Amino acid sequence: MYEIAIDKEAMKFLERLPRPVRERIFKKITAAKLNPMHFFENLEGTKERKLRIGDYRVIANVNDATKRIEILYIGHRKNVYKRASQLLHAS
């Protein structure tokens, strides 16, 4: 089973969402702990992965060596890739 680490900014975004949406996203992330490769898809052009949950996306690093899923960004599908790209290239 993989460990999950959620970035502070991603957690803040998650907390601002309506409760049913927040619970749906958290439930999907939790389900991915057993077999992340079943849930996460490659994010084109990067080493990060994406998880689709309705209109929302979770951008993460999945590290098989340490059995850790690092949630980097959560956002609405209309702007998540642009914003995540800015954050990933800034670091």
Image (cartoon, rainbow, N blue to C red):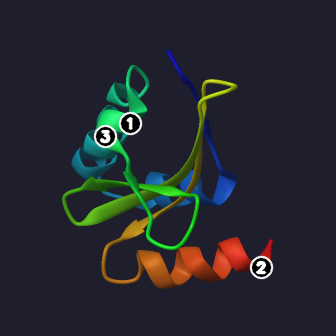
Q: Residue at x 55, y 73 (%)?
A: 84
Residue visible at 49% across and 85% down?
Answer: 82
Dot 2 amino acid type: Ala
Picture quadrant where residue 62 is located = top right
Q: Along the horizontal axis of the image, is 1 left or right of 52?
A: right
Spatial CA span between label 2 and label 1: 26 Å
Q: Are marks 1 and 3 in contact (CB under 8 Å)?
A: yes
Identify which amino acid the numbered label 3 is placed on: Phe
Q: Residue at x 52, y 73 (%)?
A: 45
Q: Amino acid at mark 1?
A: Met
Percent across and percent down for residue 15 are: 47, 52
Q: Position of residue 29 (x, y in %)?
A: 39, 37
Q: Is residue 60 above or below residue 13?
A: above
List the residue tagged with mark 2.
Answer: 90
Q: Which residue is mark 3?
A: 39
Judged left or right of residue 46, residue 74 is left
